[in-house]
Amino acid sequence: MSNNGKREAKVTVNGLTKKFGELLVLNDISFKVYEGELLCIVGPTGCGKTTFLNLLSRLIPPTKGNILIDGKDADPKKHNLSFVFQEPSCMPWRTVKENIAYGMEIKKLPQADLDQRLNKIMELVGLTESANLYPNQISSSMEQRVAIARAFAVNPDLLLMDEPYGQLDVKLRYYLEDELVRIWQELKSTVLFVTHNIEEAVYVAERILILTNKPTTVKSEVVVDLPRPRDFRDPKFVEIRKQVTELIKWW
Amino acid sequence: MSDIQSAGSKRILKILPYLSLLSVLAIWELVVDTGLVPNTLLATPIQVIELFIYKLSHADPDGSVLLVHVLTSIGEALTGYTLALLIGIPLGLLMGWFVVAEGLARPIFEMIRPIPPVAWIPLAIFWFGVGLTGKAFIIWASGIVPCVINSFVGVRMTNPVYIRMARTYGASDWEIFKNICVPSALPMVFGGLQVALAASWTALVAAELIAADTGLGFLITMGRRLLMPDMIVLGMLMVGLTGVFIGIVIDRVEKRLVAGVRR
Ligand SMILES: Nc1ncnc2c1ncn2[C@@H]1O[C@H](COP(=O)(O)OP(=O)(O)OP(=O)(O)O)[C@@H](O)[C@H]1O
Ligand SMILES: [Mg+2]
């Protein structure tokens, strides 16, 4: 899986810099995300991970630098982006099904395609039975699955996930991590997964980028070349986890 | 609240309201009957009920039967109120999301808002006379304020995560407004309906007190002119009852609508 040398770059980030007034948050960040890759970004709290994703999705403008998707400037109106937010993002006035369909509606998918994809993705995340429930009738882990299903449903060029499982308990997190890997393998999307949970990163990622404290740059990169399904107790797993932990400790 | 009350106190709570109402009526009747308050100043409850029954079928002395007054008032109120909703809600929603709409409408709105609606009465009579149009205008002016404010605030309170979510899918400003801001503001908008109704009803009665030839406010004025305290009290009670009645109807309609956009 780690034939990165040969893989095509899906996203290229060049010298990305962000200042809020005088506060330099992101300092000259450059890296590539490969086509179909599941890339994790770990970094200390407040280092600018969310800011970074907001830049990638063009919710806020960069101070300097650029982001290219397939060689063109990133633009949510042209590119197919998805964002799974840390906060619950299901619209309470739409059913599970309507929430999942929302991204596809914006993309103006023909109704037949939309229905077909909708059914497939709901099957994939196990929400078919809850299709007509409202968000206040489902649990918060199901809500997060709705958000994930909505994000995958548009077949994104780039899927951004901002600590999507931060609020959930361990058991659900394991379950949803497996689910993420499964959907990603099935749909072959390019995924950028932000977390501060090292174990989570090693469990899901093909490659991990480690960020420094503010002003933030990419400190190093770790390729996780383990077969799936992965095992937390596998000595190789433990070794990589330790390696990442060390990298994070030494600023 | 009800959980902490014992069964006994609940039973008492059922009886007490009737008891207090009855005693007020009894005291009211007594103070007039005993001459403590002269009958020329205050009608007794029995006189009011007698007049109520009489006015059901008799147009004199004020010119119309009771039902005509009630219907006039309701007609004026609903005309002005409906116009207030039709203009105020879209305006407030647009102001909440589109910078241009806020920039243009806000200064005018803020200038007009502190003027109490009843202050418009003289101008309204000037422009539209004492008929339905003038009164509808005054009601419109008082009802539109809560409509605009609630819709505006409703849009402003939209959870920014939904907006960011829509943006990352490439939604246009108009799509975000339509798909996210408006449905998210609806509970606030519905909350404004009752407030607007209360404001409208108050303004209506004030307008009719000053200029009208039918309507419940007019009935009160005629009571004063004809020195009939029973007619004044009847007018007051009818204003209250009709207001409650409209409130219940609006509440029903609102519940239907909210059920339609259930969450
Ligand atoms: N709109 C803004 N204006 C000013 N400063 C901001 C703004 N957004 C973020 N910051 C600052 O930028 C820094 C990075 O914030 P950001 O939310 O991106 O961090 P994070 O890595 O996502 O943190 P966490 O792990 O807590 O989610 C913080 O110091 C924050 O105060
Ligand atoms: Mg964050």
Image: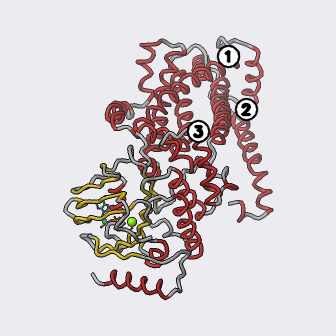
Question: Mark 2 Cα within 10 Å, few/some/many (few <14, many 20+)?
Answer: some
**Which marked residue is nearer to the observer: mark 3 or mark 1?**
3
Residue marked by disc 2: B45
Could you give the CA–CA distance between mark 3 and mark 2, rounded to whole angstroms? 67 Å
- Answer whether residue A29 is visible to the viewer in this image: yes
Could you give the CA–CA distance between mark 3 and mark 1, rounded to whole angstroms? 54 Å
Residue drawn at the location 48% of the way across and 78% of the way down? A226
Amino acid at circle 2 = Pro
Amino acid at circle 1 = Val
Q: Position of residue B26 (x, y in %)?
A: 75, 40
Q: Tell which of B19 and B92 is nearer to you.
A: B92
Could you give the CA–CA distance between mark 2 and mark 1, rounded to whole angstroms? 23 Å
Q: Secondary structure at mark 1?
A: helix
- Which residue reaches farthest bottom? A235
Q: Secondary structure at mark 2?
A: helix
Residue marked by disc 1: B68
Q: Position of residue A49 (x, y in %)?
A: 35, 66
Chain letter of disc 2 in the image: B
Question: Mark 1 Cα within 10 Å, few/some/many (few <14, many 20+)?
Answer: some
Marks counted in the figure total 3
Chain letter of disc 1 in the image: B
Question: Do circles 3 and 2 both sit on a common chain?
Answer: no
**Which marked residue is nearer to the observer: mark 3 or mark 2?**
3
Residue marked by disc 3: A111
Q: Which mark is residue A36?
A: none
Q: In the visual, does B231 lie left or right of B117?
A: right
Q: Position of residue A111 (x, y in %)?
A: 58, 39
